[in-house]
Image (tube, rainbow, N blue to C red):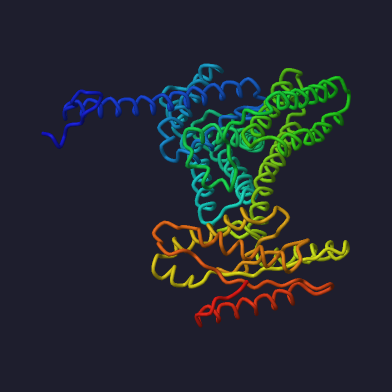
Amino acid sequence: DPARRHLHGGSVMTANDFGRLRQWAQWGAQRSVAYRYLVLAVAWLALWRVAGLMQYAPHASLWFPSAGLTFAALLVMGWRALPVLVPCAMAATLWIDRLYLTGTPPGYLLGAGALFAGAHCLAYGTGALLLRRLIRRRATPTAPAVVMAFLAIGSLAALAAALLGVRALALAEMLDPAATPGLWLPWWIGDMAGVLVFTPLFIGLLSLRYPSIEAWLGGLSFQPQTRGRGAYVGKLALSVTLVLGVLLLSARSDGHEAAFALFFLILPQMWIVHTESPLRSAASIALFGTTVAVMVAALGMIGQALVYQFAICVIAASACFGLGVPALIAQNRQLGELALSDGLTGVATKAYFFECATRELVDAHGQALPVSLIVLDIDEFKQVNDHFGHAAGDQVLVGLVRTLRMQLRQSDLVGRFGGDEFMVLLPGLTLDRAQATATRLAQALAGLTVAGMSRPLSASFGVVGVGDGEPIMEAFDRADAQLLAAKRERHAGTPAAA
């Protein structure tokens, strides 16, 4: 069938060839998904095992990074992460029985695994769903709002996971009834530390495979950065060195006061967050939390676990707030540019033009230099929009500004008053030279061509010299009056002089 054949490289591909290619593509996509699921499962179980090495109470660790991975996976992947997270949570429960030889009957053990998996995924799944809906309800989410919502909902999701998890294991008779009432607090703090420390990093890593998530991160971009790698490594080394120094000092101290020095290490973290990309900052937060947790366990300071857990949570939360600052600065810069420059043509807005012109007049008159002002607009611009469309009209305006910039000096200031009316301030030019400039501009505009338009462009001009001490608005009114007179003369059929 010729309609189903394709000539490629001199050979003809049949419908069967297309079918095989489609099958290979589907197999490749399925293989890619399976690979991602495998990596997610291995990472979750590895993080759970590392957390188990720092356990200081039954089912409570210094920090629980698997909670951060669960929350990030459910945020980015949604329900598609459950086929991995549920079996991993059940496998962790079975692993506990092997490690601690609890002797729980297989039926109870499977039930405990199912209850724990349900409690864990329900808590973080509900939190992820709530966070996504809360962010997407905002037309333009900002990074600080996203971070604030993440910190609040992530902390509440960790609390729900702790309460439900304790209840699930109690129902499965895997917990000592005497230890159950006070277990929720260390469980919650450990989970919250894992969420606050690791979720930003895992979101950044997952967003590399699911780039659509950046649309609702409020301006945060987790794209990798290659520049400044040496300086970044130096900052990380300084942060880790300070952490080790504080923890070693605390381990050698008889009192507990040295442990609180860890809170001052927010300073290097904020330095990194304010000078590096979000992905690098997230990696720095994760490295800080991991270093603290590992060293507290290695130095045998489990008795002060809550102090260090709170330090991890406070520093991670503060650093997460800092993640939104560069994005907020960039957004403010964009808003400032929009307020100062016309969005279509890039010239100064009316308000900004008059503000700059006022300063130019003060400087010029202080040096006894002349200043002139040109006001111009395109003749019969409305007909351009009516006959050729507003897209063509926009092209005309952009072409006009491009022509102005080519003909004017770098020191001349161009602004858009509105519609097709523009203003040009000419510092240092007398009136006669400004009139010659207007004539040159008119000739250049006559040679401007726009796709779809056959007739040349023409413009009317008003040119005045700005008097000493004359406000810029008065000079504009005089130039605008000249412009209107020039338009009337042109409509009357009399050539208007610039």
Location of residue 74 with respect to 92 vertically, above or below: below
Question: In front here: 23 or 392?
Answer: 392
Residue 82: image x %, image y %?
Answer: 43, 35
> Would you identify the image quadrant in which residue 376 lies?
bottom right
Residue 385 location (% of width, % of height): 44, 68
Vertical side of 16 occupied by 455: above or below: below
Tell me if I can see residue 179 in this picture: no
Residue drawn at point x = 70 percent, y = 52 percent: 410
Quadrant for the C terminus, please. bottom right
Name the quarter where the N terminus is drawn: top left
Q: Is residue 35 visible in the rendered structure shown here?
A: yes
Residue 175, horizontal then vertical, whole percent: 56, 29
Instruction: Between residue 21 and residue 218, name the one nearer to us.
Output: 21
> Residue at image x 69%, y 37%?
316
For residue 119, side relative to residue 307 (left or right):
left
Q: Position of residue 240 (x, y in %)?
A: 75, 24
Q: Nearer the viewer, residue 370 or 216?
A: 370
Instruction: Determine the residue located farthest toward the left in the rendered image.
Output: 1
Tell me which corner region of the image, top left, top right, bottom left or bottom right, holds residue 414: bottom right
Q: Seen in the image, is 321 located left or right of residue 10?
A: right
